[in-house]
Structures are given as structure tokens and as C-alpha cells.
Amino acid sequence: MNSERLTQLLQFHEADPKDTFILFALAKEYETQNTLDKALFYYLKLKDIDPNYIGLYYHLAALYSEIGQDQKALELYKIGIEIGQKAGDFHAVSELQNAKVNLEITLGN
């Protein structure tokens, strides 16, 4: 556990609570530390502040799947695909589509 990095990220967040990069970094740091409730909190906070932050959807959906909320994960993949298509981010769209299909296969859909 890298508490120094977490401490620094929390300080950055305190200085600018709407910085989307810091919110994403906090979510990823908590996820790395297996503190999934806090990771979820920061992903959702990021989604509230910037619902077009395309990188969010892959990671938040994967977290939902990890905690057994597969239907929420599938819905987030779909939303992320739509946002990526509108933004013309076809790399993100491809990653989201692959993750969605893999989850659907796992679920037997």
C-alpha cells in the first residue's frame, strides 16, 4: 500500500475537488489497495462531475462486475460506448465493446 501517494492525491483533491484527473487517480489508487467502496465513491463522484470522462466507464464497469453487479457493469459499458462514439474515440469504444462482450460471454448472454 502506497500511503504516501494516497496522501498526496487526497491533498490535491482537497485543493481542487472537481479535478477529474485527481478523482480518477484516487479511484484507481483505492482500487489498487482493494478498498473498493472508496474506489466506487470516487468513480461515481467523477461520473457526477464529468459524465463524458470516457476512461471512467471501462474502469467503473469492471469494478461493478468485480463486486457482483454485472447488470450495472453492462449498462455502463453501453453508456461508455455511446459517449465514445459521439466523441469519436474509437479506441475507447473498441475496448468497451470487447469488455462488454467478454462479460456477456461470462454471463452466458
Image (cartoon, rainbow, N blue to C red):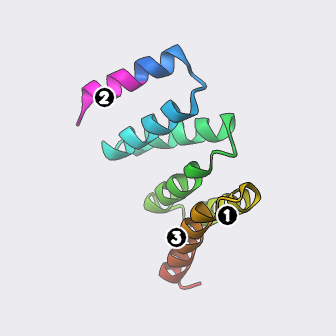
* Residue where numbered disc 1 is placed: 81
Q: Is residue 17 magenta?
A: no
Magenta region's main secondary structure?
A: helix
Residue 75: percent from left, percent from top: 66, 63
What residue lies at 69% left-to-right and 44% top-to-bottom? 51
What residue lies at 57% left-to-right and 64% top-to-bottom? 91
Between the C-alphas of marks 3 and 1, the distance is: 11 Å
Q: Please report the bounds of the magenta region as a residue range.
A: 1-9
Picture quarter containing residue 18?
top right
Residue 76: percent from left, percent from top: 63, 59
Q: Which mark is residue 5?
A: 2
Q: Amino acid at mark 1?
A: Ile
Q: Secondary structure at mark 3?
A: helix
User: Crowding at label 1, few (<14), some or many (≥20) Cα neighbours within 10 Å?
Assistant: many
Say whether residue 67 is left or right of residue 3.
Answer: right
Q: Which mark is residue 72?
A: none
N-term-proximal mark, 3 vs 2: 2
Q: Amino acid at mark 3?
A: Ala
* Residue where numbered disc 3 is placed: 99
Residue 97: percent from left, percent from top: 59, 71
Q: Amino acid at mark 2?
A: Arg
What residue lies at 38% left-to-right and 39% top-to-bottom? 30
Q: Secondary structure at mark 2?
A: helix
Between the C-alphas of marks 1 and 2, the distance is: 31 Å
